[in-house]
Image: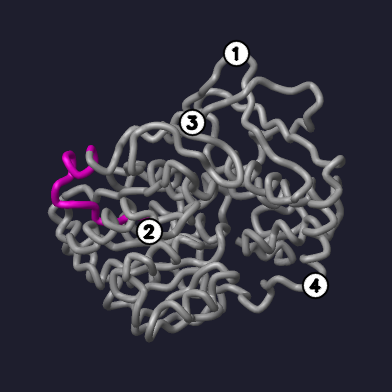
Amino acid sequence: MVALAVGGMAVAVLAVQPAETGQDRPEDAPLALALRPALAAGAVPVIAVLALNEGTETTDFLVPHAVLRQAGVGRVEAVAPRAGPVVLMPALQVEVARSFAAFDAAYPEGADIVVVPALHTDDDPLVLAWLRAQATKGAVVVGICAGARVLGQAGLLDGRRFTGHWYDRSTLLRRHAGAVHVPGRRYVADGPIVTTTGGSASLPVSLAIVEALAGAGRARVVAAELGLPSWGDAHRSGLFGLGAAHLWTLSVNTVLFWRHERVDIPVAELGDDVALAWAADAWSRTYRSRAQAVHAGASSVQLRSGLVLRTVPPDAAAVPVLLDAAVRPACVLDHSLRAIGQRYGAATRRWVATQLEYDDEGPAGACPDAQGGLL
């Protein structure tokens, strides 16, 4: 385990990229520098990306795992209570090779960073015990989206500044004494605890971690490969909520069950995790469709990150969604939302974007051929 200056590390994750307003926060700069001495000795950080076998949010898990492995910033390990299959929500299934016990045997000093996605249940006793143990050993804990609920159940949010998915805000404030919600930020650090807004924040916060660990140059290279122009923390929090229009869309799409569709996403060996995550997650949030990863000749493939993805045979009646290799991974969400809007209407597109807390009305940025979007 790297002897991290924990408070410095957590703030470094937050401070490495100025807010998109262009206003620097000079008070963060000295804290961002605190990580450098810890890494100067050449030790390699250990980063655990946690999953719950019974259910783990698709994008929250796949994106940080893939980006941090692609960046080569440390030993990145997917870990779950049990080795074996992990059901992803709302779509896909992967194999995780390391159990909690195996991770603890390999890294008795613990992880330097633990990434916690939204989980099917936020109070799994094995998860909470393991997470508390990692925090006690000095890990920086990063809660993606509703992963903040898991951090809270582990006792890590009391008295902290935090953000989280818009739907969880009141619950987190009610549960955790002295906790303070911070609006307008996609990711927030308070000491060794980092939280993010909805699932679309998984990509920018992953790049922020890359920059904190490996510097701005490496982060820019990885961002360019992904097609992400910026990973700042500015966020238009006021755009997101469960209004009457979204409730109507949800209800209508659910009730019209005879119009529900299966979406097939063909995958191949060494396919891109990030692109697949965006497409499968978005198409499975319409309440009209559910995505499957399909392969005609194999029951599983290995993704670019090294994860094993379980597949099913194609269905001739399914709606095919092809991942265009010419579309950079960060742009796949924009392209998916555009296609969802064309097939199911603008209201469904907006509902999917709201669930992922994604500003799909923002500038197109690196995706000029899509309809817009602001990661």
| Mark pair 1, 3: CA separation | 16 Å
Q: Amino acid at mark 2?
A: Ile
Q: Which residue is mark 3?
A: 303
Q: Of tags 1 and 3, which is closer to the observer? A: 1
Side of 156 where 291 appears, left or right = right
Mark 1 — residue?
297
Mark number displayed over residue 209: 2
- Asked whether disc 4 touches disc 3, contact meaning CB atoms under 8 Å apart, the reply is no
Q: Secondary structure at mark 3?
A: loop
Q: Amino acid at mark 3?
A: Leu
Q: CA distance from mark 4 to mark 3?
A: 39 Å
Q: Residue at x 34, y 34 (%)?
A: 83
What is the span of residues highlighted in magenta in the rendered image? 102-115
Determine which quarter of the picture holds residue 183. Answer: bottom right
Mark 4: amino acid: Ala
Identified at 29% across, 63% down, the residue is: 140
Which element type, helix, strand or loop, lies under badge 2?
helix
- Closest to the camera, between mark 4 and mark 3, is 4
Which of marks 2 and 3 precedes in the sequence?
2
Label 1's element?
loop
Q: Which residue is mark 4?
A: 244
Would you call the spot at circle 2 few (<14 residues within 10 Å), some (14-19), or many (20 or more)? many
Q: Where 102 falls versus 296 (above or below)?
A: below
First in sequence: mark 1 or mark 3? Answer: 1
